[in-house]
Amino acid sequence: MKLRNLFPLGQALVLAGLLAGPAAHAQQPRELPQQPRPLTLPQALQVAQANYPALRAKQAAVRAAQADVRTNRSAFLPQVSAQLQAVNSTMNQVRGAFIGGVAIPISGGIKTTDYNGATNFSSLGALVIEWPAVTFGRYRADEQRSEAAVSAAQADYDQAVFEYQTQVADAFLLALGAEKSVALQRANLQRAENLATVIRAGTRSGIRAGIDSATTNAEVGRARLQVLAARQQAREQRTRLAGLLGQPTQEVLLDSMQFYAHLPQTNAGPPAGDTARTNNPLLRAYARRITAGEAQVKLLSANKRPQLNLLASTWGRGSGVADATTDKGDFAINSSPSAGLPFKAYDYMLGATLTWRATELIHSGRAAQAQRIRVEQARADYDQQALQLATQQQNAALQVDLARQTALAAPLQLAAARQAYTQARARYDAGLDNLLVLTQAITVLNRAETDQALATNNLWRAVLLQGAASGNLGGLLGQL
């Protein structure tokens, strides 16, 4: 982008910032803590778990499921309702009539000799207590369903954390490998520059041919390009890691923790089938979904049963319609609020109601059958995941074995390459060999150093892959 094109863009950004100022002030982004510097792998896993939005969403889902448990339990507590009202209405009504609500309905006739449009005040105050005392297993089934939902949400969160930790650990190792590549290419550049300095001095003194100086300068340029390419790749890997940590704007400084000082220990093979099924977070999540589905089946089956409610109510009523009739048989009406609003009659009621919806047998039975089919689907998904994990475990064991053999063979290649470079340098300095042989020796040494670092990094990643397949990263983190 040309410089003159930046000014309209900058003006537009400033204008947009001014227009969006109040909105941005109203909703501030979540402030993220600074990363530890240097950042170790365990610290990276901790930062990712605390900051990544997807994991915080999973945590919120667990808390919501726990809140649902408390909500469902409160639904089976006694329900206390109160109602207080004042009404001004015509007298063509049942004396003491009221607007519908929680109060118990009443009946009684006050038929007058003729219709009258006069109004009067009436009042009502009621307190009703209703308690589903006996639900014939529905309460327990609903509680088990909500608790199973909490377990499923927690298992889903644990699985998400484990999967994300695996991604972060792999990104950390890749970024670490890229940093190691930068260090190796810098060392290669330093070798090329040192050799170029010696050759230029020899060229000026007439000991070396001019073509040697030009060739060496070309090798120095190539080494610089390799350093730039390695730096670009390292920057990309660090940016990817920072994004996984939930802090893409912060620079990541890695702590190697001597990853390249020793090789990791490897397991003999994958754990036993039952152990892997029990400990693997992914399979635990699928198993909890089966349990939640079975709890839903029990709840739907419990809906076919009746329910016994205990009921208690007390209320008071007032009316501007007189209790006694006049000589003409009409009720006397007093339209003043003081006559109609004070309570005059008080009642209470105690009882029990047994409710059974016969048609619920059909509805709940069909819903339970549909839910059983979903449980069968969840079991099939569980078996599929178990099969895939068993395959991944076998593949991870093969990858670890191959990476371990490669990592053990790489030092032999590096030692031979160093010896070849030393001999080629000595022969070149003695005038017994040309620059081409020395350049090839430098290239072989650089490739051997790169292969050595790559083999070590691949072995650590293979151990990570094995831990991811078995559902336990302790084999990797326990060696740090």
Image (cartoon, rainbow, N blue to C red):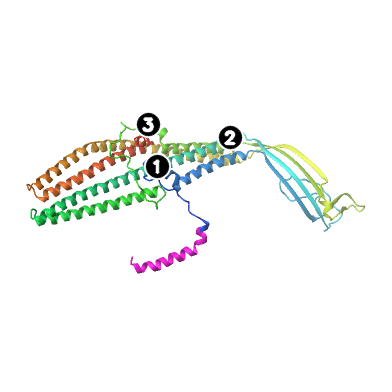
Measured along the vertical axis of the image, is residue 254 above or below residue 408?
below
Q: Amino acid at mark 1?
A: Gln
In the image, which disc is placed on residue 140?
2
- Which badge, 2 or 3, is on the more N-terminal residue? 2
Q: Position of residue 201 (x, y in %)?
A: 13, 54
Measured along the vertical axis of the image, is residue 258 above or below residue 429?
above
In the image, taking residue 83 as reference, residue 217 lies left or right, namely left
- Res 350 quadrant in image: top right
Q: Position of residue 349 (x, y in %)?
A: 76, 39
Q: Nearer the viewer, residue 73 or 330?
A: 73
- Label 3 sits on residue: 273
Which residue is depicted at the point 28% across and 41% down? 457
Disc 1 crowd, CA 10 A, few/some/many (<14, 14-19, 20+)? some
In the image, taking residue 143 as reference, residue 439 lies left or right, namely left
Quadrant the C terminus occupies: top left
Q: Nearer the viewer, residue 448 or 293?
A: 448
Real-space Cα separation, disc 3 to disc 1, in angstroms:
31 Å
* 373 inside magenta stretch: no
- Which badge, 3 or 1, is on the more N-terminal residue? 1
Badge 2 element: helix
Q: Position of residue 53 (x, y in %)?
A: 45, 48
Say which of marks 1 and 2 sits in front: 1
- Res 132 quadrant in image: top right
Badge 3 element: helix
In the image, taking residue 314 as reference, residue 306 lies left or right, namely left
- Label 1 sits on residue: 43
The stretch in magenta equals 1-24
Real-space Cα separation, disc 2 to disc 3, in angstroms:
34 Å
